[in-house]
Image (cartoon, rainbow, N blue to C red):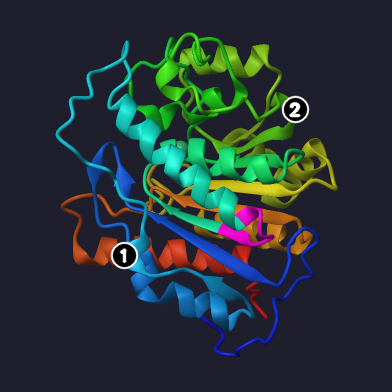
Amino acid sequence: MSLGAKQDQPTYRHRFLKDNVVGLVGCPFSGGQPRSGVDLIESGLVQDVEDLGWKVDFAGADTLVSPLVSDTPDPDIGKLKKPRLVSNVNKEVAERVYSHASKGQLTVTLGGDHSLAMGTVSGTFKAYPDAALIWVDAHADINTPLTTPSGNLHGCPVSFLLGLPGTSKEEIPEFGWIEPVLKPERLVYIGLRDIDEGERKILKENNIKCFTMHHVDKYGIGKVVDMALEHVGTDRPIHLSFDVARFTSQVRGGLTFREGHYICETLAETGRLVSLDIMEINPSLGAGAHDVKQTVDVGRSLVRCALGETLV
Ligand SMILES: [Mn+2]
């Protein structure tokens, strides 16, 4: 899929970065279970990124964020499952992302379940307090410890970043390191399709801008991305958190392959992307070799588009 032409500098000039360096963070962490999340990096992603004119700061697969699996008991807190493990992994992710971002690198985090955005967004916003967050996902992931139907923390990261009721240090000290760095008006969703009842209420009460699949159908992805960028402000650094689960299999009316790539291409064009999450790329357990390869290929091509790969 690569055009084969090696660039000596990135396609677009980046406003907030120094030295055209991509800082890679890998985290094969999913629901407390270690999984093979290194596929994407091992598949040649570093070479892809270098071919697009970037230098890569990645110390190798043995520096992936460890899932910190241990025998220490980690009982549920309320409904939340594996709360201490999720918190500890995210704290480490936040430190790694901050260390790249604070050097002026464009951080690319490959995960892993979407709870990891607690860490990535915390790290990015520590370096760029005025940043905006664009969340591309079928789900809003904004349940709080009080509203979550499942207790899975991958459905909750945004609520912690906003500091919604139920997430404070007093209420849940295990996550007390997370600062409420995100403002509702600097968050925008693209591609929502399945929203829980409690989430719908939170989105309304906090007046959070959502472009659902209804809006994508109505306006087309081009107009939706323009409106999303306008909503969060045209001169802020941007953190893009992209959930690719169910994105590769177009079974239930989510974003298409091209719509997803269009989002990444357009954010690259802004020259304001400072942090990118490609999450839920871990091929599901038991998937066939073909599915694994397809998931990895899609993740790779989204990263390339976000880093400036163009069709011609
Ligand atoms: Mn998600």
Amino acid type for the residue under numbered disc 2: Glu
Amino acid type for the residue under numbered disc 1: Asp
Mark 2 sits on what residue?
Answer: 185
Nearer-the-camera pick, 257 or 97: 97
Q: Which residues are magenta?
A: 101-107
Where's residue 45, x and y in %?
A: 45, 72
Where's residue 91, x and y in %?
A: 45, 38
Q: Nearer the viewer, mark 2 or mark 1?
A: 1
Where's residue 212, x and y in %?
A: 60, 34
Magenta span contains residue 103: yes
Q: Is residue 294 above or below residue 92?
A: below
Graded by Cα atoms within 10 Å as few (under 14), some (14 to 19) or many (20 or more), the crowding at tag 1 reads: few
Q: Quadrant of residue 292?
A: bottom left
Which residue is located at x 36 percent, y 74 percent? 43
Q: Which mark is residue 220?
A: none
Mark 1 sits on what residue?
Answer: 62
Of all residues, the one furthest to the bottom in this rendering is 5
Magenta span contains residue 260: no
- Badge 1 element: helix
Graded by Cα atoms within 10 Å as few (under 14), some (14 to 19) or many (20 or more), the crowding at tag 2 reads: some
Left-right relation of 279 to 259? left
Q: Quadrant of residue 148?
A: top left
Which residue is located at x 62 percent, y 19 percent? 203
Tag 2–tag 1 contact (CB < 8 Å): no
Total marks drawn? 2
Q: Earlier in the sequence, mark 2 or mark 1?
A: 1
Q: Is residue 235 visible?
A: yes
Cα distance in 3D space between marks 2 and 1: 38 Å
Which residue is located at x 49 percent, y 22 percent? 176
Q: Is residue 14 above or below residue 157?
A: below
Q: Is residue 72 above or below residue 270?
A: above
Answer yes or no: disc 1 within 8 Å of ligand 1.
Answer: no
